[in-house]
Image: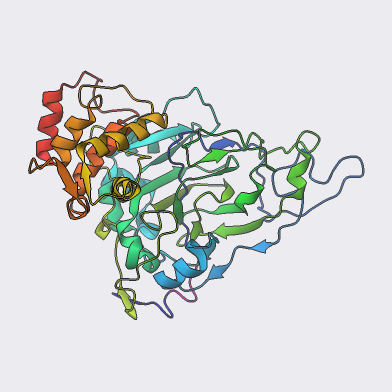
Amino acid sequence: MLVNIRNSFSGKLPFTIFLVMSAVRVSLFVSAENIHSPIQFPPSISEDQNFPTGHLQPLGHQRAPEGPVKEYFEVIRADLFWEEHVSKRVPLVFRQGIGESPAISTWTDDYLTEKYGDLDVLIELKEENRSHSTRRMTIMEFLGRYKEEDIYVVTVLPDPMRREIQVPPCLLCGTFLDYVHETNFWMSSGGTRSVIHYDADHNLHCLVAGRKDFIMIEKKYYNTLYFLQKNRYSGSGFSEIDPNKINLLEHPNVAKVPWTYATLMPGDCIYIPAEYIHQVRSYNRTMSATILFTSGPLVGAAFEPTGCDREVFEYTPLSNLRVHWTYNKGDRNIEMGYMNIEVLRYSILGTMQERNEEILTKDAFVDFWQQHEDRGFEYDKDDLSEDPRKIFEEYFDMEDKGFLTKHDILNISRESLKAIARLIDPPHGPVTEEEGSVSLDDKQAAREEL
């Protein structure tokens, strides 16, 4: 099937993309007991002579919106997506951006149980509880419990399920193809509102089932919205404000913040720029697939439109995309929230540029490694991570030259880069077996399998 980039998807319903928090793991949802039906969004504004407008009301009741997020009824070209939105960090909605995804019609609870029930997912509580640890269970177990318990899925989209999700054509060429580093699966019984937050990565959040409403706010209002102080090197953050009940006596500045809005239905996607503030609400059974990407190797890097001159793009399932971090049945860890490994590659190259050298020596790599240690990454050191010289020798300097050229670094395998990322930020979260000590010999064996 071919997709014409000029007039594809016109006349169909909208498409949505998923949100994910990187670096810092917090529960995104808070209790939403006061969600009423029928749904009125954006909400009507009613004044109270005794209190500020919207006092003790949900976010959005304090002032009228500026208008809807810009919508497209066809998916725009990757170069235009970059020029008009990604480079300027301007959100958009693609109506029916993934409208031809089989998942939209097939992903009933019975189908998911039969087809994917033995796959593992990560589970969070709907109500924010920072003392709660992420749990891991099969899709079958979750589907048997989620209508009765306050739990939801936010996990790496399992590889077999990626076959049933369409890739929006705006990601099918140019720089974007190399920088999709994670895809996520979200599912809940509804009745949720997220905290007010922003994420580290660009995000295409696409809806598969249900409805989601988004409040979108520019990053410059970070201080006005009482965000908690984040870790210096974290790319995400969230506000201390309860979005279900805004206390304007304690947080009067909320009423000054302009906002835009979007409603997603199955097949629709919303582009949420990196660090763009947003708050999300759902009302019934919802499923989403999100695509996390960076726009290039470095902040400010130019977009390379390789292959973007085609008039027609073939329908492409998400399984055809080279995603950095994935999950398949039997994996001990569900690797979620890791760095973009191509950004890691160019960070190593940046060390050469900073030193104005044509080669990366072992000592230069040691400096690079120590910089990352100084940034406060918390991990249990082992024999390997305590000696970056061993890392250099075992992962990079296969020819035992004692140095790397730019060409060498550009040709480091992605699996080797992922191994380095795991040493910087070791696997975390529930595993399929009891934790045990792992020897350096075991790690070497694992590397040989890469």
Is residue 60 left or right of 448 when viewed as pictured?
A: right
- The answer to whether one can see residue 404 in this image is yes
Residue at the (86%, 49%) spot, across then down? 47
Residue 261 location, x and y as percent? 63, 58
Residue at the (16%, 21%) spot, across then down? 439
User: Furthest-left residue in view?
Assistant: 399
Is residue 49 left or right of 68 when viewed as pictured?
A: right
Q: Compare residues 35 and 23 and report the one nearer the observer.
A: 23
Is residue 187 left or right of 433 when viewed as pictured?
A: right
Residue at the (50%, 22%) spot, across then down? 131
The image's colouring method is rainbow
Residue 72 location, x and y as percent? 52, 71
| Main SS class of the magenta portion in the image | loop
Residue 133 location, x and y as percent? 43, 25
Instruction: Identify whether 26 is placed above or below 322.
Output: above
Q: Compare residues 389 and 125 and report the one nearer the observer.
A: 389
- The answer to whether one can see residue 172 in this image is no
User: Furthest-front residue in view?
Assistant: 356
Instruction: Identify whether 54 is placed above or below 135.
Output: below
Q: Is residue 10 magenta?
A: yes
Q: Compare residues 90 and 183 and report the one nearer the observer.
A: 90
Instruction: Identify whether 36 is placed above or below 332.
Output: below
- Residue 401's quadrant in the figure? top left
Residue at the (37%, 64%) spot, across then down? 171
Q: Is residue 261 magenta?
A: no
Q: Compare residues 71 and 416 and report the one nearer the observer.
A: 416
Residue 118 location, x and y as percent? 26, 38
Quadrant housing the C terminus:
top left
User: Furthest-top residue in view?
Assistant: 437
Q: Which residues are magenta?
A: 9-13
Is residue 418 left or right of 445 when viewed as pictured?
A: right
